[in-house]
Image (tube, rainbow, N blue to C red):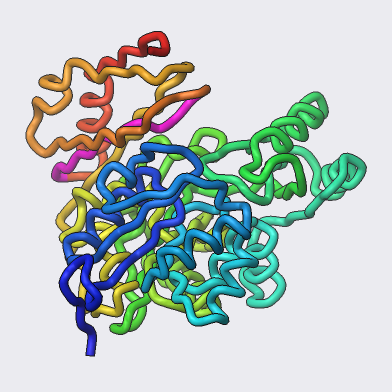
Amino acid sequence: MAKIGSVMTPVGRKALLLGSGELGKEVALELQRYGIEVVACDRYANAPAMQVAHRSHVFNMLDPKELRRVIELEHPDHIIPEVEAIATPELLKLEEEGYHITPTARAAWLTMNREGIRRLAAEELGIPTSPYRFASTHDEYIAAIEEIGIPCVVKPIMSSSGHGQSTVRTPEDVEAAWKEAQEGGRAGAGRVIVEGFVDFDYEITLLTVRSCSGTTFCEPIGHIQVNGDYRQSWQPQPMHSAALKQAQEIARKVTDALGGYGIFGVELFVKDDHVIFSEVSPRPHDTGMVTMISQDLSEFALHARALLGLPVPSIHFLGASASRAVVVEGDTNCIEFDNLENVLREPGVQMRIFGKPEIKGHRRMAVILATDETVAAARAKAERAYNALQVIVHPRS
C-alpha cells in the first residue's frame, strides 16, 4: 500500500535530485505537490530546481566520493538522476546497498553515455539503429569516419542538449568535429560516437511511462533540433498507425530492458513506416516540455507519480500544442525578458522562465508554450509569441 507521511518528519519521504536544471525544477514542483521533501543537487549554485527545493548541495556529481558523501548525509528515499554527468558506477554500488535509484542504477549507467545504450539496443535487443563506430583516440576517430563515410554525425559519448555534437558534411569538417566533441563533452575530452547519416522523414520523442499500472505512451512529439539541441516541439506528430505501433514496440522493448518506474524519452527516426532507434533518456525530455500545456498530466507529473509507486491509469491529451525554446547567447549573469505583454497577448499561450543564473556561450533560458486547433496553428502561435519576445543581455554585474 502506497503512503506518504508529513513532509520533513520521520514519516515523510525525501527525494534527492541529481541535476537541478529546468526539467529538474518541474520534477521538484510535482514531487512537492505530493508532500515530498526535495533536496536539489548540481555543479553550480542557484540552479533552477534549487530555487524551489527545501535544500540544496553544490558539488561535482562526477566525483564518486562527493556523490556518496551527499547521499549518505541526506539518506533519501528516492535518488533521481536528472542529468547524464553523474558517477553512475557509484550509483550501482549505492543501489546494491539499498538505496532506490530512479528508474534503476543500471538504466542511469547505460544511458549516461551513448555507448551503453546503443550497444544495448543494437547488439542485445536487435533494434534497428543508424550505423555507428566508437573511437577513443584521434586515429580511431579517423578510421571510424572512413568506415562510416561522409556525411556523418560526431558526438561525445556523454553530453546533452547538443553540446559537442556536429555534422561532418565534407572532409574539411573532420578535424573541427573532433575538436568540438573533445571540448563539448560533459566529462571533458574522451570517447566519441560516429554515426552514419540517417535518411528520415521526421524524428519523434515517444514519452513512455513505466508505472505500477504498466506501460503507457504519450502522443508522439515531433521536434526540430539544431546540432542536437532542441528548438521546437509539437504534439501530436502525425504518424501512420503502422509506424506508431512500431515506435511503441521499440520503446516498450528498450524501456523493459532498462526497467524501473518513471518516464523515458525515447528518440526515434521515421522514414515512411520504418522506425529507427536513436537514443533514450530515463527521465523527462526537453522536447517533452510541450506536455505542460498539452496533457492533463505533464511529463514531470507523470515522472513523479510513477517513481513514487503511484498508478498512471490514463493520460488525457488536451489538444494540438507546440513549444518554442528561448536560447540566449552571451556571457552574463544579468538578463531581462521584455515585451511580455505581447508575448502572452493571444489566448492559449504560456511561458516558463527557468531562472538560470548566468549564460556562458548559448543557453536555453525559457520556453514558450501554445495550443490551438491544429499543430500548424499552435506552432505558428508559439512562433509569433517568440518573435514578440525581447531579450536584453546586460554586462555582468
Quarter where residue 207 is shown:
bottom left
* Image location of residue 122, percent across then percent down: 67, 69
**Residue at (20% x, 57% y) in the render:** 295
Q: Residue most toward the top?
A: 395
**Residue at (24% x, 57% y) in the render:** 298
- Image height of 237 relative to 145, above or below: below
- Image height of 194 relative to 32, above or below: above
**Residue at (45% x, 56% y) in the render:** 18
The quarter in which the N terminus is drawn is bottom left
Magenta stretch: helix, strand or loop mostly:
strand
Q: Nearer the viewer, residue 348 or 84?
A: 84
Residue 242 visible within the image: no
Q: Would residue 368 be counted in the magenta stretch?
A: yes
Q: Nearer the viewer, residue 377 or 394?
A: 394
The quarter in which the C terminus is drawn is top left
Q: Is residue 377 left or right of residue 66?
A: left
Q: Would residue 298 be counted in the magenta stretch?
A: no
- Image height of 337 relative to 79, above or below: above
First to last magenta residue range: 362-373
